């Protein structure tokens, strides 16, 4: 496994380190949105991880398949009841480590968790740096992620024969604006 993927330790502590992601108030709107969208169809999740979303979505009756880079994350998924209904393909995106960019942006600042992105704007790679205090010990982790702008995704979708159908800031269909920190986009085959 490449050294910059989600390793055993990250997989083992994923829920403990990001408890807010597992809050039903966060998970349920995602699953509602996706189950509604899937209808009688299936779902493909890029970066399925430990199945935080895939497992409850599968339990709703939506056939789910995942693509995942990290065998450690998939091993956690496989340990969960219901994961036998979910197919996973291990994918290697050939992530490249590049010179650091100039832009740094904090996204989490709490007494237990400091996280910031370091952007290389030329290559559109964001390095996520995490510093956790776990049981009085410092744990750090840095991983590179390729980021895309909505307009770039729209172009990719167009090349794949799809057009934008909906774009929101979140799973509860909040309006998408220049201040939004996330987006939920739905493209349809045309
Ligand atoms: C932050 S975790 C999210 C996991 C899950 N989707 C969730 O919502 O809990 C990101 C996951 O995406 C995987 N990943 C990142 N880039 C990937 C890529 N290019 N191809 C496949 N998996 C990738 C990581 O290994 C990790 O398991």
Image (cartoon, rainbow, N blue to C red):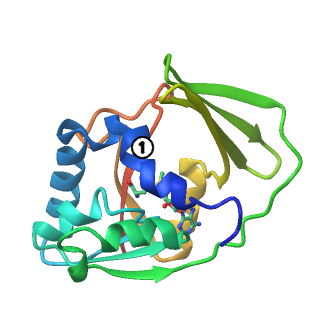
Please state if 75 lies on the left or on the right of 140 as rendered. left
Residue at 17%, 47% (x, y): give it. Answer: 28
Within-10-Å neighbours for mark 1: few <14, some 14–19, many 20+ = some
Report the label total: 1
* Residue at image point 32% right, 32% down: 175
Instruction: Report the quarter where the N terminus lies.
Output: bottom right
- Can you give x and y, in whole percent of width and height, for residue 51 in the image? 32, 63
Q: Residue furthest right?
A: 99
Tell me the SS state at disc 1: loop
Q: Nearer the viewer, residue 91 or 154?
A: 91
Q: Quadrant of the C terminus?
A: bottom left
x, y percent for residue 99: 89, 48
Identity of the residue drawn at 73% across and 50% down: 124
Residue 187 in percent (x, y) is at 37, 63
Q: Is residue 15 in view from this perspective?
A: yes
Q: Is residue 9 above or below residue 68?
A: above
Towards the viewer: 144 or 75: 75
Left or right side of 155 for 52: left
Residue 4 sits in which quadrant?
Answer: bottom right
Q: Which image quadrant for residue 83? A: bottom left
The residue under label 1 is 183
User: Residue at position x 72%, y 72% from top?
Assistant: 94
Q: Is mark 1 within 8 Å of ligand 1?
A: no
Front-most of residues 151 and 88? 88
Looking at the picture, does residue 15 appear above or below residue 161?
above
**Residue 23, above or below 154:** above
Q: Relative to residue 63, is residue 15 drawn left or right? A: right
Task: Describe residue 133's horizontal placement relative to residue 35 as left or right.
Answer: right
- The residue most toward the front is 136
Residue 76 vs residue 40, the one in the foreground: 76
Residue 154 visible in this rendered orientation of the protein: no
- The image position of residue 45, as x and y in percent, is 38, 68
């Amino acid at each position: 496994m490449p050294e910059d993927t989600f390793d055993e330790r990250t997989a083992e502590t994923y829920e403990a380190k990001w408890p807010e992601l597992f809050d039903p108030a966060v998970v349920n709107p995602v699953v509602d949105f996706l189950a509604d969208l899937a209808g009688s169809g299936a779902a493909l999740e890029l970066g399925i991880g430990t199945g935080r979303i895939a497992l409850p979505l599968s339990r709703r009756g939506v056939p789910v398949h995942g693509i995942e880079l990290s065998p450690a994350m998939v091993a956690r998924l496989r340990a969960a009841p219901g994961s036998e209904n979910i197919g996973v393909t291990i994918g290697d995106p050939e992530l490249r480590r590049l010179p650091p960019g100039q832009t740094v942006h904090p996204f989490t600042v709490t007494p237990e968790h400091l996280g910031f992105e370091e952007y290389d704007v030329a290559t559109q790679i964001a390095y996520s740096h995490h510093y956790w205090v776990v049981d009085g010990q410092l744990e750090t982790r840095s991983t590179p992620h390729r980021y895309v702008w909505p307009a770039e995704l729209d172009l990719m979708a167009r090349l794949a024969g799809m057009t934008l159908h909906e774009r929101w800031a979140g799973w509860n269909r909040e309006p998408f604006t220049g201040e939004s920190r996330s987006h939920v986009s739905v493209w349809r085959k045309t």
